[in-house]
Amino acid sequence: MNVLFAGGGTGGHLFPAVAVIEALRETAPEARPLFVLGGSRGASLLERYGIAWRSIPVRGMPRGGAARMPLFALRLVAGTVASLALTARLRPAAVLAMGGYASTPVAFAARLLGRPVFAAEQNAVAGVATRWNARFARRLFLGYEGALSGAPRGCALETTGIPVRREILRGDRARALDRWGLDGDRRTVLVLGGSQGARGLNRLVIGALRLWGREGEGAQVLFQTGEADWETVRDSCGRIAPLVRPHPFLDEMGDAYAAADLVICRAGASTLAEINAVGLPAVLVPFPAATDRHQSKNALHLARSGAAIAREEEEWTPEALLVAVQGLLENEKLRSEMANRSRALGRPDAAERIAARLTEAMGKGKRRARTDVGEAGARAGTGDE
């Protein structure tokens, strides 16, 4: 039975979908998941997890004035037509719109063709696409309580938390030390700029590392830099190279979290969900250009809960970042309290809860299909048209 997922090509949409698909493969092995993208961004990640994908000709809302709106509208129409054709051909038992520009045409098409539509919102405040998707969905899964103040008629709200991949919960510290050549006697700071890197965050951390002493206060840094900044980080940290392990991308994130005592990162919803699931204190630098500043709102939620220290990128300096990190490294009691508060925010069963709703819809789809087949047989037997 086909199950459609739709969303943007970023990790914030893809990783939670992967987590739900992992759970769905256990609860409903007959399900055939397919992810619908707007373009090919994110396709390689889906292929890594053995998930089929298709592309529709739609792009995000343009920035730069009304001049680009006609092209956006044309692409939206084309994406909707493509979604209608795909949905009519596959007749999915359920559709889950993960948010992002590619999800709304699919959700609209599925609703128009009478297929069960669900939607998910990972951020602390619902985005534009999710607010539209809720109009077509029977249920909206929220990562944070209150992310949407009120749902459209016919759409139920359910706070499930944000789905987290199984590998995140299965990390091994000893394996991580061996994999990345880390010192087991040192505390480990994990720096995550996201899978594509984050230049502003990377520059901030490099500045702080340049102020670090050669001994690094008894700590070491595992640094995911992104491809573009890897050589810059490597060369900039040459003076304390044994204490800084820069890598363009960390494949085994569960092991990376298992090795970490503290995380420095952006405030994407998926990353924060992983940090909460494993229970780690964090220093957060929200991406300033995020739509509707949703990363700032995500970060504020953790900071108010006592699980993180958060400031806007323009408010951080290398000196301030170093002081914050050193303060946490030197205060084991505070780190432990923040870790406990982080863990209390985690919802490691989110994927299973969402998968259960999809499985329920699939079950109803099976019964409907059997009824349709039975009625068709009866008509054939009686000569009815």
Image (cartoon, rainbow, N blue to C red):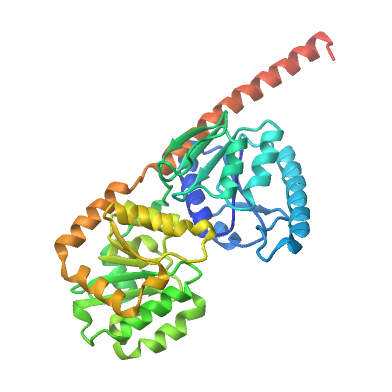
Report the front residue among 308 and 355. 308
Residue 138: quarter of image: top right
List x then y, in percent, for residue 131.
57, 43
Q: Is residue 206 above or below residue 79?
A: below
Residue 369 position, x and y percent, is: 66, 25
- The residue sitting at 20% across, 71% down in the picture is 327
Q: Quadrant of residue 318?
A: bottom left
Q: Farthest residue toward the top? A: 382
- Which residue is found at the position 63% from the left and 23% from the top? 368
Tell me: 302 left or right of 50.
Answer: left
Residue nearest the observer in this picture, 88 or 103: 103
- Residue nearest the observer in this picture, 157 or 174: 157
User: Where's residue 123, x and y in %?
Assistant: 46, 51
Q: Where residue 28 sits in the image (x, y, percent)?
A: 51, 36
The quarter of the rendered structure image containing the N terminus is: top right
Q: Is residue 31 visible?
A: yes
Residue pictured at 59% horizontal, 51% vertical: 7
Q: Residue furthest bottom?
A: 239
- Residue 1 seen from this side: no
- Numbered circles on residues, count: 0
Q: Is residue 17 above or below residue 374?
A: below
Q: Quadrant of residue 60?
A: bottom right
Quadrant into which the C terminus falls? top right
